[in-house]
Image (spheres, rainbow, N blue to C red):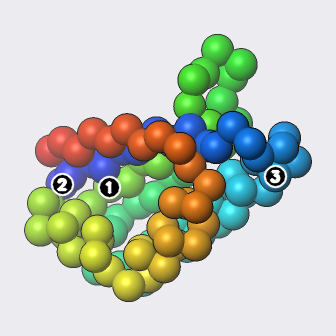
Amino acid sequence: MVKHVILWQLKEELSPEEKSQVKADIKEGLESLVGKVPGLKEVHVYIDGLATSNADVMLDTTLESKAALAAYAVHPAHVAVADTKVRPYTRTRTCMDFEI
């Protein structure tokens, strides 16, 4: 099994209302991928960080294998969510992948 964890910061120019909507859209989009992407076992998106956080969104996924992670990265359903709900609104991305 493989964990794929990402932290994003949203673009600073977004208003608080826009940030709230973007976070909800990211959560809905990414969590909807379970059952659509082979090898993707679990997706949890956290959008309600404490004020002490320096990230706005956290993605925590579990995949069957390194091969499943590689396939997830280019799967059309994942790419569509990333290109429409994530990338246009984020300014930084930090990722850690590891075996469990």
Category of crowding for the residue at label 1, using alpha-carbon neighbours closer than 10 angstroms: few (below 14), some (14–19), many (at least 20): many
Residue 68 or residue 55, whichever sits in front = 55
Of 21 and 61, which appears nearest the observer?
21
Q: Amino acid at mark 2?
A: Met
Indicate the secondary structure of the residue bearing disc 1: strand
**Image position, residue 59 (x, y; %):** 47, 48
Secondary-structure class at tag 2: loop
Q: Pointer 1: what residue?
A: 62
Q: Which mark is residue 11?
A: none
- Quadrant containing the N terminus in the rendered view: bottom left
SS of the residue under disc 3: helix
Q: Is residue 26 visible?
A: yes
The amino acid type of the residue labelled 1 equals Thr
Give the mark toward the camera: 1 or 3: 3
- Kindly give the residue lying farthest to the top in the view shown: 52
The 10 Å Cα crowd at callout 3, few under 14, some 14 to 19, many 20 or more, is few
Residue drawn where x is 51% and y is 60% of the image: 87
Examine the rendered structure and indicate whether residue 60 appears above or below residue 55: below
Q: Residue placed farthest to the front in the image?
A: 13
For the point 58% across and 72% down, the residue is 84
Q: Amino acid at mark 3?
A: Glu
Residue at image position (62%, 37%) is: 56
Which of marks 3 and 2 precedes in the sequence? Answer: 2
Image spot of residue 26 (x, y percent): 61, 60
Do residues under tags 2 and 1 come within 8 Å of each other at their CB atoms? Answer: yes
Residue identified by numbered label 2: 1
Q: Which residue is mark 3?
A: 18
User: Going by the image, does 49 lie left or right of 94?
Assistant: right
Left or right of 13 on screen, residue 4: left
What separation in Å lies between label 2 and label 3 (alpha carbons)?
35 Å
